[in-house]
Amino acid sequence: MHSVITNAWKGDPYPIDTLFIFMANMAWNSTMNTGEVRKMLNDRDAGGNHKIPFIAVCDAFQSEMTAFADLVLPDTTYLERHDVMGMLDRPISEFDGPMDSVRIPVLPPKGECRPFQEVLLELGSRLKLPAFTLPDGSRKYRDYPDFIVRHETEPGSGIGFLAGWRGADGRSAMKGEPNPEQWKRYEENGCFFKLELPRSYQYMRNWNRGYMEWAQRVRIRRYGDPILIHLYSEVLQRFRLAAQGKWPGRRPPERLAARVERHFDPLPTYSLPLEAAHTDPIKYPLAAITQRPMAMYHAWDSQNAWLRQIHTHNYLFVNAATARAAGVEDGGWLWVESPWGKVRGMCRFSEAVEPGTVWTWNAIGKQPGAWGLAPGANEARKGFLLNHLITDALPDGTSNSDPVTGQAGWYDVRVRIYPAEPGEPQETFPVFDTLPRAPGTREAPVSWLAYVSGRISGR
Amino acid sequence: MSKQLALVIDLNVCVGCHACVTSCKEWNTSGEAGFLSDDNPYGRDPTGTFFNRVQTFEVGEFPDTETVHFPKSCLHCEDPPCVPVCPTGASYKRAEDGIVLVDYDKCIGCKYCSWACPYGARELDEHQKVMKKCTLCVDRITDTSLAERDRKPACVLACPTSARLFGDIHDPASEVSVAIRENGGYPLMPEWGTHPANHYLPRRKTRRPLHADELVRHDNPLKVDGKLPRPATSEPSLDDVTSW
């Protein structure tokens, strides 16, 4: 996932004609190696054609990513659409039983905005993809709410997105035939469903036989056997045997066999991040990490007039002793450099950070002109991204991700810090060109505003 | 004794998420104390009027460090220095519940009250030219059209960790009085003699000692899961499930 643009640019495993991005700011804070990825998005081959021929982006906001789009599909906010936090993807469950929930629109969509789910459903239907088409070739689902109610994991399985009020009479939970009244039942119940398990099912569920049998019957689990922590993992050992050519089943590709054999260790082990093998620990002694600010939901809404007053720009938090040893001052400008890139930002001394680690808030820094902010906004002039320092691929050509889980190595980068020279601009680096205003948008900055009962006043 | 409404804020629980800051502004900008304006909202150095702000600071040196999130708003002092200095009588303390308020029709924006407040809790709205401050959501807590449980300040309802309590500190049996009494609640800068109604609960250590015998299971004499004697399926169980 974290290499999607690099792979699209490389044509790995094959060239694509369309890159379709939804709500991911892959030209900025959601990608590693941001500077190079931005070049890839615009890169052309020898014939002068774009290596990624067509980019469609669906987002509710004008982000750094929408600026690269050939086609922008304006999304709605959560207030304007149906949504499901259902059993098939991270339901909201509590310890005492499974729960799921829905969103029901409270406002009509503005302008040409359309919920992304509806767009996907429309595309699937018009392309006549089998999941969205009846045997006679006609459209299977009217819209997203209809799809949510009637989709089943397999024909007749009785398992769909939502666990509550299933069955023709709406009396089944977890499993049961589609109920056309399901959305209404959720709305009546405050937009959520909860199935409280019997007390005897609530505890030690990893080896609770009653729970296991129930879970298998409602198909939360495929098998009814206890879930044990494997101190010796037969599963991992199978991968290792396959890499060694000692397993009769599938084998990893030749170029990855050594990596699989080395890292799929059936016993618990400790190993340094893969990136450590490509980093000089003397030159780059510090670990660098990021964290999302609590007041914002990643880049989305961090341009909000109130929220941006809470975090208008970010600092690099450095243990005071570490900073002093590097000659960096509290509030001063500094360079943060990894083997893969460097950024300039401001330093804040902290006693709450381990001396061998530095950290900063993620996704505060913005490209000038993005997110409806004035080009001179603090986010664009003082805020910075650590993403420029993080690589998505290692020098040996492999992915910078955990070899067993595939988790991208966001937190593996090592850096050094040093003060900015006195004559340098008091500004973040790198700075990209100011984005032009998107067609049809008003000039964003006003001198002041005040919200009153949903109306905006000000000038 | 008369009523004195107040907030009690638990510094041991606050995580600094700012939900109280934004929910306060959301309620009050559209309420009787509104509006709360913002300057340069989408430009350089944005600034605005807030009734409630969270200051974050560190205490101690690594590794013995604590990060303290410290929400700050009007403390509704029992002897408020902002009231007698007001030349027009705009700044006043309500007799019936002890809330300190500003009458915008009388306020001339002279800022005497903000100079007199030792806590820096007042902010002049640059566009309405009147002094603004926390009202304890007076238009909400007294609104009988709301359900009883919603008649609380917006910040209290928004707090995800329940770090903010609201009630009458003159009632010794109230939730806030009990919290102050039993958890070492303290007012800010009592040496000023302002008798702040709002109190803070201090940072405190939570320790959970674990004894060796807690690690041994006593309910499994055979030491083997699955070989325990089973009740007949017809016997009633602890709950409504008898099938296993």
Image (cartoon, coloured by chain):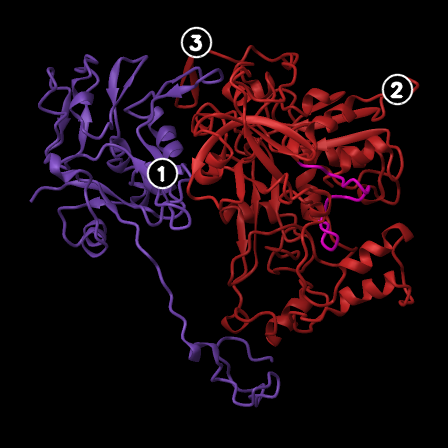
Chain colours: A red, B purple
Letter of the chain that mark 1 sits on in the rendering: B
In the image, residue A360 lies at what x, y percent?
A: 52, 36
Give the image quarter of residue A306: top left
Point out which mark residue B57 bears. Answer: 1
Residue in the picture at 61% in, 70% down:
A206
Mark 1 to mark 3 CA distance (whole Å): 36 Å
User: Is the C terminus of chain B in the top left, top right, bottom left or bottom right quadrant?
Assistant: bottom right
Residue in the picture at 71% in, 71% down:
A232
Query: Going from the N terminus, do you reach mark 3 or mark 2 first?
Result: 2
Residue in the picture at 71% in, 50% down:
A402
From which residue to which does the magenta span run? Answer: A390-406
Please state which of residues A281 and A120 is positioned toward the viewer in this rendering: A281
Q: Which residue is mark 2?
A: A49
Q: Which residue is mark 3?
A: A459
User: Could you tell whether A276 is left or right of B122 in the image?
Assistant: right
Q: Please name the amino acid that badge 1 sits on.
A: Phe
Q: Say if A391 sits above or below A192 in the image.
A: above
Q: Main secondary structure of the magenta part?
A: loop
In the image, residue B184 lies at what x, y percent?
A: 21, 52
Q: Please name the amino acid that badge 2 sits on.
A: Asn
| Residue furthest to the left | B1
In the image, residue A447 lies at what x, y percent?
A: 44, 10
Q: Please name the amino acid that badge 3 sits on.
A: Arg
Mark 2 to mark 1 CA distance (whole Å): 54 Å
SS of the residue under disc 2: loop
